[in-house]
Amino acid sequence: MKILCILLPHFPLRCEIRRHPDLQSSSIIITHAEGSQKLVLDYSPELEGLQRNMPLQQALSRHGTAGLIQADIPYYWSVFNTILNSLERKSPLVEGFNLGQAYLGLDGLQLIYPDDHALVDAVREVIPVTFAASMGIAQGKFPAYLAALCNSTESCQVLTDNPDSMETFLRDIPCDVLPISTKSKDKLRDFGIRTLGQAAVLPIGPLLSQFGMEGRLISELARGYDSTPLYPRFMEENIEEDAMLPSVTVSLEALLIAVEALFSRVFARDSLKGRGIRSVALWTRGWTSEYWERVIRFKEPAVDIKGVISRIKPIMEAFPQPCPVEQIGLKITGLGYRNGRQRSLFSEIRAREHLLDDIKQLDLRMGSPQVFKIKEVEPWSRIPERRYAMVPLSQ
């Protein structure tokens, strides 16, 4: 499949400059937190020696005078989703799972655009000038990504299907660009394999023996072959709401009141009449710009505020806020209709159904079965461990 890759380098930094133009002349580091550790999310290009997810202390040891900005993840995704929405007017097949990196499916667009340059010009029209887009076209996502990554000009680099030209292009690209584990990258380096050209000439057998299933991936990508399909965004309605709190708070009760107010706005929309919520991303931003987010899914679409709050409250209790909260918001990414279901006339059976429903909700919240029952498997076996097995009660 012919694919166009669009890279927006230093996307979080460009978003901050777009919001605060005075940062254009400053050297800054954008940070985010993973647990108790502060990491680098993005940085000004002139700050040499930095890389993404580097510990902040290590970055400050190199550039101690750089300004620090706490990452505003909801804002970055809002800007990126706006760009993706604009790209969907150029191609119906748009993938954008990573900030600042998008893929467009080009098959069939030759009926609209006479050549690749006309398509690239149309795409550049919908990307704000703040973001210096780098583009590449190839057969497959990984070759298109490399074409965009190695393109430093305003034009779009197009890779042909010619094996010789593909081999020449890939020959000197470092193996660090491969989407494999850090352990495998280190092993390649230990073996003295530093470029894709060196990896491409290796037989598949030794690669499989040393790297397992990643060995086949290394062999294929190093030769410019990528069969990974394009995963376009779902064309469904997304609902977003957010609110600034009157004062910063860590009170769970105050946060739940704010969440209830947001869902009151959601359920008041005409577009939600007769439908329920299947999935919602709840996020908060603290007074020090700390970001917290959890995705909550429902076994059956929730059609009222009570059902939503009963599911969200345990999540917020289990995952407390990292700091006092000043803003809270939600993004509903899945809507659906409730399934019709007839309850039993007998109270004992209804009680059992309610218990099973509670167990399923517990399994869904914890991510794995929590309640089990003992079931006969091989009662005739001479080995006691084979006679019975524990299976989830919800099955």
Image: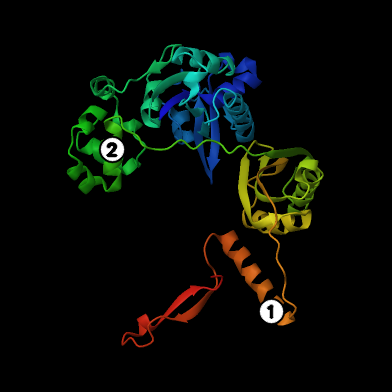
Q: Is residue 389 left or right of residue 344?
A: left
Where 359 sits versus 14, above or below?
below
Residue 253: where, in percent of width, then height?
77, 54
Amino acid bearing label 2: Ile
Few, some or many C-alpha atoms within 10 Å of disc 2 (few <14, some 14-19, many ≥20)?
many
SS for callout 1: helix
Query: At 70% across and 53% down in the image, what residue appears?
Result: 337
What residue do we see at 60% from left, 19% from top?
17
Left/right of residue 202 with respect to residue 368 in the rendered view: left
Q: Which residue is mark 2?
A: 218
Considering only order in the chain, which callout, 1 or 2, is on the residue closer to the N terminus? 2
Give residue 241's position: percent from left, percent from top.
Answer: 73, 39
> Does any portion of residue 48 appear in the rendered image?
no
The residue positioned 62% from the left and 39% from the top of the image is 290
Q: Nearer the viewer, residue 7 or 159?
A: 159
Quadrant where the N terminus lies?
top left
The answer to whether any part of residue 242 appears in the image is yes
Mark 2 touches mark 1? (CB < 8 Å): no
Q: Amino acid at mark 1?
A: Ile
From the image, state whether disc 2 or disc 1 is nearer to you. 1
Up-down relation of residue 210 to residue 302 (above or below): above
Side of 173 relative to 378 (left or right): left
Q: Quickly name the residue at label 1.
A: 349
Query: Element type at marker 2?
Result: helix
Q: Nearer the viewer, residue 250 or 310?
A: 310
Disc 1 packing (10 Å; few <14; some 14–19; many ≥20): few
